[in-house]
Each structure stands twice: as structure tokens, then as C-alpha cells.
Image (spheres, helix red, strand yellow):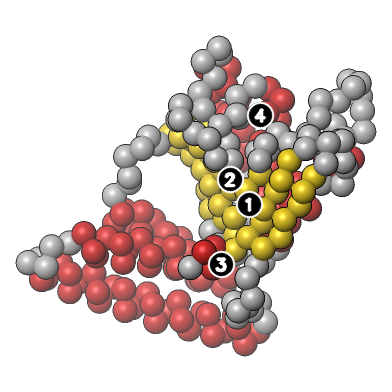
Amino acid sequence: MAESGDVTENLFDVSKRWLLKAVAFDSEDKLIAAFSCYKEGLDKLMEFLKTVPESEVAKRTAIRTRLVEYLGRAESLKKKLLASGQISPQSSEPKHTQYRIGEGETGYGYDRIFGDCLKDASVVWIRVEDSYIRKMYQLHFFLQFCELCASRCPGCLQEIHLVTGPDEADAAKQRQSLDLIAESLAERGIQLRLSLRDSLHDREVYFSNGWRVKIGRGLSLYRKLSRQLDLGTHDLSLRQCLETTVDIFHESILR
């Protein structure tokens, strides 16, 4: 499992990684995944270009040449995907859904909460910010979230980045458990990246296709089961919830 701190990765290396994935998906005719990777790689490459001094003319020219090349391919893919109906033009209407979940309510499994964010099969990375993925029951909720993402995004999801707080009471157990989840994800071609932070308050999930989900209680929005073998153990839609609010929105409404 890759672990990262607060130091930002070299933007050029990150862009190169995404663009190489894009080319690989492109060659396999996985056009939606390729388009998403081109977008990520181009965004990072443009960010990197901004850091290159104006005096380094040759370097800036080389980067611009690559940008034009990959932008052309990305635009070509976009036209194909739009024409075939595999993607749709961004709606001009704000995209926002809110669930106000009452104490003890059921019917709010992960599929209902996150399903719309995963339905277009173009998700290449997911970032989970939840300060409490520490205890075993919280790790089980995270594992169930990973199961949903892996099953809904086969072949395109490349990375899940978990940002959470360290379990000061048993850091070794937390790390061991996350390592096991990482091994299982790796068998399906998905990398689990971990960042541990003490000061983390927001609980939010970001998807590479622009969707974001804010949950007041994070992934652990469910009541403790009353029996060892109880409905809701695996199907979270049958499990009673804690009172919380869920906001599902596309980042385009923030622009």
C-alpha cells in the first residue's frame, strides 16, 4: 500500500502516470476510461507548465507540444463518446441531491448514496476523507465501500486514496487491516493509497468524474447491530442509520 504525506507529488510525474494509463486504455478501446485518464493527466500537465519559469523556453515549448498532442486525442475521444451516447453533455442545471436521514431510518445503503457517482464507468480515482477509519467496524464499512467501487468500476478504477486519522490506541492493527484491504484491491488492479492526518474534520468522498459526497457521519453512518447475526450485516440498506445529512453534488455547481 502506498503511503503519502502532505508533500505534493511532482506534478510532471503524476501527469505522466495518468497519460500512460490513458494511452494503454486507448489501445484497448476502453474509451471512457481513456478519456478520464487523459483529462486527469492533462490537468496535471497544465498545472506543471505553470511552475516552469518563462526563461526555460525549450522546456515550455516541449510541454506545450505534448499538451496539444494529448488534447487533440482527448477531444477526438470526447466526440466519439458523445456521438455514441456513452457520455452526455454537462447539464446546465445544478446537480445536487440531499438526504436528511432520521435516527433509525433504513434504505440508505452505499449503493443508494454513491451509485449515481459510479454509474458512468469513467471513475479512475476516488479520494475518501474520513477521520475515523480506525476501529474494526469502521474498517469493515470502508471495505464494503471498496467492494461497491470495485464492482461498479471494473477495468477503469485505478486508485482509492484514503485520508484518515491514526488509531493512537492500536496503530499497528489499523495498518495491518488496511494492508489486507490493499492486497485485495491490488489483485483487481486498484491501488490503495493512505494518508494519515491528525487534524481532519470534513468527511467527504471525491470521484474523478467530478462528483462529491459529503456525509455528516462519514462512512460509519449506521447503528450498531443488536445481534451477531442480524439483517443489515452485509446489506446496509437494511441497517438502521444514525441521524445525519448526505449531500451529493457535482463540482460544476461550485464554479
Say what secondary structure mark 4 lies in: helix
Contact check, label 4 and label 2, Cβ < 8 Å? no
Sequence-wise first label, 3 or 4: 4
- Residue located at (67% from left, 36% from top): 217
Q: Where does label 1 land, which residue?
A: 213
Q: Where does label 4 land, which residue?
A: 139
Q: Nearer the viewer, residue 182 or 172?
A: 172
Kindly report which numbered mark, 3 or 1, lies closer to the viewer in this rendering. Answer: 3
Number of the label disc, if any, that sits on residue 204: 2
- From the viewer's perspective, tell me whether residue 228 is left or right of residue 216: right
Sequence-wise first label, 2 or 3: 2
- From the viewer's perspective, tell me whether residue 147 is left or right of residue 1: right
Q: Amino acid at mark 2?
A: Glu
Q: What whole-number distance in Å separates the C-alpha atoms at marks 1 and 2? A: 6 Å
- From the viewer's perspective, tell me whether residue 23 is left or right of residue 162: left
Q: What whole-number distance in Å separates the C-alpha atoms at marks 3 and 4? A: 32 Å
Task: Report x, y in % for residue 227.
Answer: 91, 21
Contact check, label 1 and label 2, Cβ < 8 Å? yes
- Residue located at (69% from left, 42% from top): 145
Q: Nearer the viewer, residue 41 or 255?
A: 255
Q: Where does label 3 land, which residue?
A: 253
Kindly report which numbered mark, 2 or 3, lies closer to the viewer in this rendering. Answer: 3
Say what secondary structure mark 3 lies in: helix
Number of the label disc, if any, that sits on residue 124: none
